[in-house]
Amino acid sequence: MSKPLLSRVRRVGNILFLSGMIGRGDDKETRFRNTFERIKETLEENGSSLEHVVNAPVYLEDLDDRPTILNPLWREFFPENPPTRTCVQAGLMGREIEITAIAEIPD
């Protein structure tokens, strides 16, 4: 059996590094929401939470999705003290959104 190509999450000290997450679902809004939910779940499984995310680069297939879908979800999932973010248009081959995250694990 071969070793995995990458890790879903890595811990270094009290910092978590999440690999890019993509969402699943029948429509674009559902896939975007599911991306955030998968990040939330991964953080909680590893002793952190969305409120401890410090940086979250976002890769979008279409930057027009930023004001219409991404920003409302960003406000919902990060209502207070949101993380830093960079949005980049990328060829995601129909996946529409991918988000990586860096979060601290609180003491």
Image (tube, grey):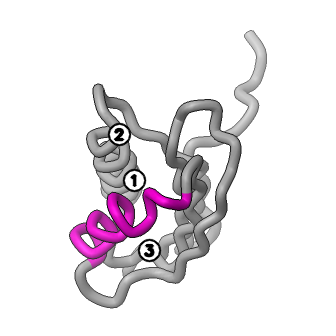
Q: For residue 66: magenta?
A: yes
Number of the front mark, 2 or 1: 2
Residue range (magenta) = 63-78
Residue 103 in percent (x, y) is at 49, 71
At horizontal 50% and vertical 80% (from top left) the residue drawn is: 54
Circle 3 is placed at which residue position? 53
Helix, strand or loop at label 2? It is: helix
What residue is rendered at 53% in x and 35% in y? 95
Q: Are marks 2 and 3 in contact (CB under 8 Å)?
A: no
Instruction: Name the element at disc 1.
Output: helix
Badge 3 amino acid: Val
Between 77 and 48, the one nearer to me in the picture: 77
> How far is the residue under mark 2 from the one under mark 1?
17 Å
Specify the quadrant of the image occupied by residue 106: bottom left
Across the whole image, how many numbered discs are drawn on residues?
A: 3
Residue of label 1: 39
61 or 20, nearer to the observer: 61
Disc 2 designates what residue? 28
**Residue at point 39% right, 69% down?**
67
Relative to residue 95, is residue 90 depicted above or below? Answer: below
* Lower position in the chain sequence, tag 2 or tag 3: 2
Residue 91, x across and y down, in percent: 69, 42
Q: Residues within 10 Å of mark 3 (few under 14, many from 20)?
A: many
Looking at the image, residue 35 lies above or below residue 2: below
Residue nearer the viewer, 58 or 65: 65
Is residue 98 shown above or below 58?
Answer: above
